[in-house]
Structures are given as C-alpha cells and as structure tokens.
C-alpha cells in the first residue's frame, strides 16, 4: 500500500537536491550575499563613526536645529546618540546577514531550501523591526541631542515619514514572498515524492 | 491510503528484473524499489504508462484499491 508517511525521494533537505544554475547567476547571488553581509557590518559601524566624528554644527544642520537648541554636545551625548542609532539599525543589520544566507542558498541552486526561506523571512522581520524602531529611535535621539539645551528647549519629537512607511511596506512584501516560497517548497517537496 | 501496489507481483509473473524496468522507465532502482514497496506519495501517468508498456499490462494490474472498514460510531 502507498505509505503517505514515506521518506521523501529527493527531499530538499538532502545535500544533493538542487536545481541547475548558471555560473553567472551563481556569481550574481554570491555577490549579492557578500554585499548584504558587508552592508550588515558597515551599517552599525558607519552610524557609530558618524556620531563619533561628525561636527556638532553639521549635526545641527542635519536635523535642522539651531546650535543653542542642541546646546553643549559632549562625548556622553555623542555616545548616547551613537548607541540609540546603532540599536535602531541593528535589526536591519541582522536581517541583512540573514538575507546573505538566503542568497548563498540561491547561489547553490537551492531556492526552496528551508535555510534560505528562513533567511528571507528573517530579513523581512529585521526590516519591520527596524521600521518600527525608527520613530522610537528618532524620539530618543532628539531627547538626547537637546538634553543640554536651556530651560524649555528640550524636545520630545515624534516623526512618522514616508521612508518608515515604505520600509514597513517593503518588509510586508518580503514576508509575503517568504510565505509563498514556504508553500512552494511544500509543493516541491511533495512533487519530489512522486515517481 | 488504501491503494496497494502490486508491481512486485506483476514483475515476478512476467519474469522481469527490476533493474531492466527501472532502466526502461528512466528512474533509479532505488526509486523503483520504493514504488514497489508503496513508499511513495504518488505515481506519474508517464511512469505508469512506461510500466504498462514494458510489462504489457493495465494500470489496474499494478494498482489495487482496498476498501477500508468504516469506523463504528
């Protein structure tokens, strides 16, 4: 009798299961994977360096604030600002690392590998968390930057811009794609059990 | 599922080796063995057609439906 709980003939988890992939396509996916990993490392490093090295006047101009509002911009403020910004970009960094895993699975011709799909889903999660963290981070950053301002000049700002909304929408799209790929992987797995 | 695979019986009746049939269908012996043991989720019409052509039989000779007893309330 047909055993519906039979071991799959060519399960995608088996090391040999892969689809043929052109060398150029593999190179493209590998490059994308490396770029994602590099960006994941550079993103927090870049923002930390910015807050460590940027001129106080430049920062004021960047966030459209008069120097007297920012007040004395000391090392503690720089450190707090860097910490807030790094924490804001860390979920995205993690997501990019996971995206790198997904690209590497694609490069090996395993588009339905559970590891790759999990990588894509985690990228969407990382991006969604980063999109949510942005307004919170902005509020905390404004508070930190205006901490030393004169009486009545401390600011507690709220921001919700199109960048954040687009980022959240993009994350939702990627999550939907990952979900569709997960379903496709189940179908592919079932097909592999047909002779 | 109550579908019995009688391929092993038909093979024995015809005196055909699994290796030869697998080669004719274009699948591995390991996969044919799984098919014989009913350890697959399904069989493609293409495979069934090749088996019937090689063994000179009908799909009904290879596949058999076994009625399962209805569970009492």
Image (cartoon, rainbow, N blue to C red):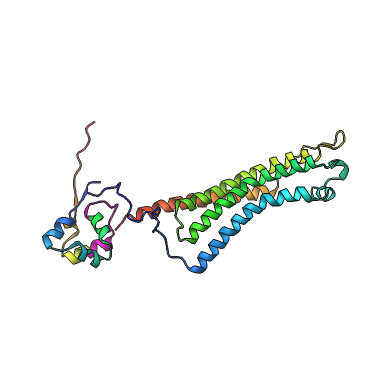
Report the front residue among B67 and A133. A133
Reply above or below: A16 against B67. Answer: below
Q: Is residue A180 visible?
A: no
* B42 magenta-colored: yes
Q: Is residue B42 visible?
A: yes
Residue A167 at x, y percent in the picture: 63, 50
| x and y, in percent, of residue A33 in the image | 56, 58
Residue at 14% from the left image edge and 58% from the top image edge: B10
A175, above or below A22, in the image: above
Q: Quadrant of the C terminus of chain A?
A: bottom left
Does the magenta segment cover residue B21?
no
Q: How many marks?
A: 0
Residue plotted at (16% across, 62% down): B57
Q: In the current view of this chain or complex, which residue is farthest to the top?
A: B73
On the rendered structure, is B55 left or right of A43?
left
Question: On the picture, is B65 further left or further right than A178?
Answer: left
**Residue B24 appears left or right of A156:** left
Q: Is residue B66 left or right of residue A115?
A: left
Front residue of this view, candidates A185 and A165: A185
Q: Residue at x 45, y 61 (%)?
A: A109
Residue A131 image position (x, y, % from top left) = 64, 46
Q: Position of residue A181 (x, y in %)?
A: 47, 53
Judging depth in this view, the residue of A127 and A44 nearest the camera is: A44
Query: Residues in magenta?
Result: B36-50
């Amino acid at each position: 009798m047909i055993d519906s709980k039979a071991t799959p003939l060519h399960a995608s988890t088996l090391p040999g299961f892969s689809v043929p992939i052109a060398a150029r396509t593999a190179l493209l996916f590998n490059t994308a994977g490396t770029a994602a990993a590099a960006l994941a490392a550079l993103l927090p490093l870049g923002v930390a360096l910015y807050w460590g090295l940027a001129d106080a006047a430049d920062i004021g101009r960047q966030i459209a604030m008069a120097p007297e509002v920012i007040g004395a911009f000391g090392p503690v403020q720089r450190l707090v600002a860097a910490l807030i910004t790094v924490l804001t970009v860390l979920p995205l960094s993690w997501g990019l690392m996971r995206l790198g895993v997904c690209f590497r699975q694609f490069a090996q011709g395993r588009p339905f590998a559970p590891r790759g799909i999990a990588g894509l889903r985690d990228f969407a999660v990382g991006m969604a968390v980063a999109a949510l963290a942005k307004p919170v981070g902005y509020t905390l950053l404004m508070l930190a930057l205006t901490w030393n301002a004169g009486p009545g000049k401390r600011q507690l700002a709220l921001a919700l811009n199109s960048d954040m909304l687009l980022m959240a929408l993009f994350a939702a799209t990627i999550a939907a794609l990952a979900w569709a790929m997960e379903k496709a992987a189940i179908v592919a797995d079932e097909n592999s059990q047909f002779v | 599922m109550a579908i019995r695979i009688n391929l092993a019986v038909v093979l024995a009746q015809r005196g055909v080796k699994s290796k030869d049939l697998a080669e004719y269908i274009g699948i591995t012996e390991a996969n044919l063995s799984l098919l014989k043991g009913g350890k697959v989720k399904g069989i493609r019409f293409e495979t069934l057609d090749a088996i019937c052509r090689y063994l000179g039989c009908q799909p009904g000779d290879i596949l058999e439906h076994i009625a399962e007893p209805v569970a009492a309330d």
